[in-house]
Amino acid sequence: MRPWVWALTLALALPAAADQKDKKEKDKKAAEKPAAVTPADLMAQAEQKVASGDRDGAVELLRKAASMEGAGGEPSLRLGRVLESTYDLDSAVDAYRVAAEQLSGPAKGEALGRMSVVQETRGMPEATATAETAVAVDPSGAWPLIAAARARAREKKGDEAVALAEKAVAAGGGASASTALGYAQEARGDLTAAEAAYRSASEAEPDRIGAKVGLARVLRKTDRAAEAEPILQAVLASAPGAIEAYKESARVKLAQGRASEAMGDAATAAAMAEGDAEAQQVMQEVTIAKALESLRSNQPDLAVQDLTALRDKNPDLAEARVGLAKALLAKRQTEPALAELAKAVELKPDLAEAHYQLAYVHHFVKRDAAAALPHYEKAVAADPGNVEYRTNLGAALVAAKQFDRAAEELTKVVDSPGYKQPVAWIYLGQAHLGAKRYKNAIPPLEKAAEIAPESPDAAASLAWSYFGLKDAEGFKKYGAKARSLGHKEPTLLQYLSRVEGGEPIK
């Protein structure tokens, strides 16, 4: 080949070889470059983080996924779930809100339903409106039904709440649905069923705040406040933003007569949730209870002074008038107390404690059970789970000779979980005694005597029950015990003397 031909061939070949080499380099770099990470990839990685216990790592990945173009609302929904599990409640609400704005159908309903429940826990007044929107979006979804059930429970619509919660359970709502059912049963006044639902939810998901606070509330309402306190302490240690737990903690301490200690929890709840009416109400309850502590130290004048000042500063605050009435009653000023209670009922017709105190004055101070009955009934209707209200309703019914209804009300009391007081057992026995069901009267009266062996009322009622059965030995046994315990009712003592003298019961 001639030199010039060879040179030309080489010149033509070199660019082609260079192009081929560049192409290989580009292909190699493309192969080495990782594929673009998608939101789905990050969500999958976040699931792995949650499974391994690294929730903070999961939150970081889900925030990144949610910020990616075209991610949609699913990463935000998952982010809300994880934030809720870490008790970062405000951030969870924000995540659910973003998710709801971008999702539709059942997923949107879930985001709204979850947001409503967290808003309630956080003491946000918009929880009910969010629940209504969730149901409108997905009427049969578990989370919208859960949120709606809890909203109805807050409105004291127990039957509606139970129906919605049962649908949520059937829809696969799990522990959250069981918690909603607990709230619903509580609103309906069935504390036994409420406790069972809360315990079921807590066992299924031990970290669930609502179930634990609900269980604590039921324990308080059934005279087990001391058992409730450590449950709430554990909740607040892990979830310091749980307003619901602070409110209940304050009430648990009030139930144990520790108003000064309750003040800290009440103030925290009121400060953290300025828009939560219940949080402000708890603060008022503690303030009133603290003033009433003066009664325990035999300083009724100081209690009247403090509560009069509170009433004058807040003339429309019905609870302050109820507290003042209690202080006035301690000074035996019955008529001024009745005037304060009547005004409290006028200001707040559904205030259970105002009706209860009115009933109590008529029943035990004025000895007028008939006048007490309508107020007891209103107190029980406003707070159906309150065993003290229902016990005294039963007592008034016994005094009014409505024995069958009295037995029905008092049976509800003694069947309440954890009930350990003798009072309702005594009244239940007296209801059967009044109806001449002597055999039925003996078991509850024996239970009362077992709980309170020094009760003259239990012994005297047992004596009359055996008298009705014409059982002279039983009558003498319990009649003598009643006499030894200071029972002074002359009719029983006269009959006892005659039967002890050998006269048969006719």
Image: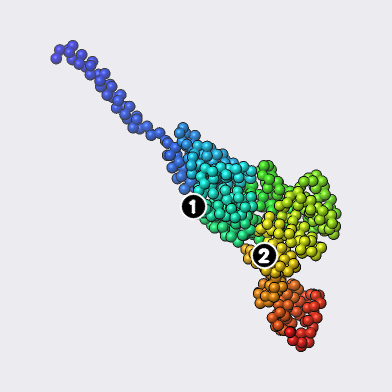
Query: Which residue bears the numbered disc 2?
Result: 409
**Nearest to the observer: residue 254 or residue 428:** 428
In the rendered image, residue 260, in percent from the top left (x then y), is placed at: 74, 52
Badge 1 element: loop
**Nearest to the observer: residue 216 or residue 378:** 378
Seen in the picture, residue 486 relative to 32 is either above or below; the reply is below
Q: Is residue 465 left or right of residue 139?
A: right
In the rendered image, residue 124, in percent from the top left (x then y), is placed at: 63, 43
In the rendered image, residue 16, in percent from the top left (x then y), is placed at: 25, 20
Going 68% across and 47% down the picture, which residue do you hit? 278
Query: Which residue bears the numbered disc 1?
Result: 172
In the rendered image, residue 232, in percent from the top left (x then y), is placed at: 63, 53
Q: Considering only order in the chain, which callout, 1 or 2, is on the residue closer to the N terminus?
A: 1
Seen in the picture, residue 380 relative to 463 is either above or below; the reply is above
The amino acid marked with disc number 2 is Glu
Going 66% across and 77% down the picture, which residue do you hit? 439
Are the residues tagged 2 and 1 within 8 Å (C-beta)? no
Q: Residue furthest left?
A: 1
Going 28% across and 21% down the picture, which residue do you hit? 18
Examine the image and state in which quarter residue 123 appears: top right
Q: Is residue 191 left or right of residue 317?
A: left
**Nearest to the observer: residue 445 or residue 263:** 445
Going 45% across and 41% down the picture, which residue do you hit? 43
**Nearest to the observer: residue 435 or residue 232:** 435
Seen in the picture, residue 185 relative to 66 is either above or below; the reply is below
Instruction: Locate the N terminus and report the quarter of the image it occupies.
Output: top left
Report the colour scheme: rainbow
Q: Is residue 28 left or right of residue 1?
A: right
Q: From this viewpoint, is residue 300 visible?
A: no
